[in-house]
Image (cartoon, rainbow, N blue to C red):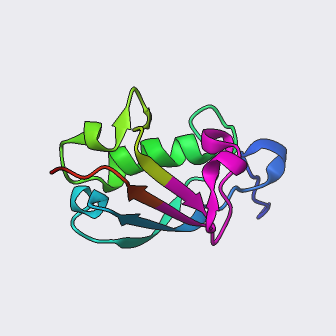
Amino acid sequence: MGEQHDSSPNGVHSKPVTLDVEFSGGLETLFSSQRSHRIQIPAKDDSEQPANLGFLVRYLCENLMKDKRKELFVLEDRIRPGILVLINDVDWELEGEEEYLVQDDDTILFVSTLHGG
């Protein structure tokens, strides 16, 4: 008949997560010189785990970063030392760093504290 069957686990669709991502301290130059981005990312990573900040960082590098100098943002797939990360104005170290599960309407701010001179 006209019934539709959902092929996702438990019959539940995972809608994308909508986030505000901001860059400061020079990092915006790696992202089309745009400080603020409203983006949608998949709710789950490739292994069907809920999207966390580590997944967001990989997503940003693969989909949003236009500059080829990825090493200015990440080293060995982790945020480079010297970059402050705030999740809804709270230091990410208090939120579990890469393990923090991103949620709709989160604001994630990346600030480079390293300056040439």
Horizontal placement of 68 versus 81: left or right? left
Does residue 42 lie above or below 72 as drawn?
A: below
* Whole-percent x, y for residue 114 in the image: 31, 49
In the image, which residues are magenta?
A: 85-109
Name the residue at 74% across, 52% down.
6
Residue 82 percent coordinates (x, y): 40, 44
Look at the picture and state if 44 lies above or below 104: above
- Residue 103 belongs to magenta span: yes
Image quadrant of residue 86?
A: bottom right
- Does residue 39 appear to the left or right of 61 in the view shown? right
Name the residue rendered at 54%, 42% in the picture: 55
Residue at image point 43% right, 67% down: 22
- Identify the residue shown where x is 62% and y is 56%: 91
Left or right: residue 37 compared with residue 10: left
| Quarter location, residue 27 | bottom left
Q: The N terminus is located in which quarter?
A: bottom right
Q: Residue furthest right?
A: 10
Q: Residue 93: x and y, percent?
A: 65, 46
**Was residue 98 drawn as part of the magenta stretch in this picture?**
yes
Q: Total number of numbered labels?
A: 0
Residue most toward the left? 117
